[in-house]
Amino acid sequence: MRAYLTLFSLPILLLAGCVSSNDMHTQSIPNDDYLAALERTDPSRYDLPPPGSAEEAEMLRRVRDLFGNYTRENLAAMVPQVYAEEVYFRDAFKRLTSAEAIRDYLVEGMKPLKGAEFVFHDIVRSGGDFYIDWTMRLDFKSTPPGTWEESIGMTKMRFNSEGKVIFHQDYWDPTDIVYRRIPIAKQLIAFVKGKM
């Protein structure tokens, strides 16, 4: 499997502009930035609301309100209320370190979409870590109206003493819903998946 990924990732990297290995992004390798963020956001450093408290419910409600009403206007207004100014954010595409950068990234991500929504299925708390099980639904402008595509994922979040997100790590596979929209990537992904 590794040989196929290495062999077929090369044309995509070349098409993307010959990115150096230092510029490449990953959402799942525990690199130095990730490890430093885990240490910096250790929940024992913050006063978090007790499990099941009204304060915890309010903190999580803000996250639900942000992602449950996934529009440009709501993202622009709510991101600064949900995320701390200094934050560690990493998804399948980007690693960001400020609420402003997250807001701009999420708003920009709406350009190819007619609509988007996140359905939260479960939120589990383990100490000061919160795990959110979700389904992302996207309605692309390039598809017939109402053609929603879905992808499942999980997010790990940590909060500061003010109830704002200071750590956001997504775990999801963008190959089926996003990368397959790029013609050469679609062919390579289908080939690789067929070989596994």
Image (cartoon, helix red, strand yellow):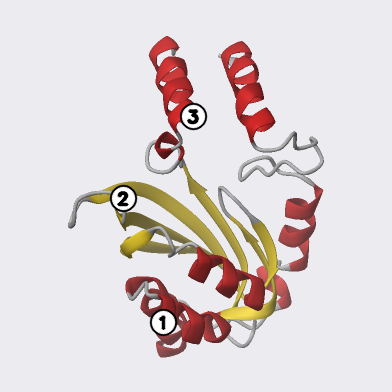
* As drawn, 78 above or below 93: below
Q: Amino acid at mark 1?
A: Asn
Earlier along the polypeptide chain: callout 1 or callout 3? 1
Residue 37 percent location from the top left of the image: 74, 61
Along the viewing direction, whichever of 114 and 61 lies nearer the viewer: 114
Q: Residue at x 54, y 86 (%)?
A: 81
Task: Rate crowding at label 3 as few (under 14), some (14 to 19) or many (20 or more) other CA atoms within 10 Å.
Answer: some
Q: Amino acid at mark 3?
A: Ala
Tag 3 residue: 185
Q: Secondary structure at mark 2?
A: loop
Tell me: 53 left or right of 141. right
Q: Secondary structure at mark 3?
A: helix
Residue 9 percent location from the top left of the image: 61, 24
Q: Residue at x 64, y 32 (%)?
A: 15
Q: Residue at x 64, y 80 (%)?
A: 84
Along the viewing direction, whichever of 45 and 176 lies nearer the viewer: 176
Residue 61 percent location from the top left of the image: 39, 81
Tag 2 residue: 142
* As drawn, 148 above or below 82: above
Earlier along the polypeptide chain: callout 2 or callout 1? 1
Along the viewing direction, whichever of 126 and 102 lies nearer the viewer: 102
Q: Amino acid at mark 2?
A: Ser
Spatial separation of the CA atoms under disc 2 and disc 1:
23 Å
- Numbered label tally: 3
Tell me: 34 left or right of 169. right
Earlier along the polypeptide chain: callout 2 or callout 3? 2
Query: Which label lies toward us, 2 or 1?
Result: 2
Tag 1 residue: 74
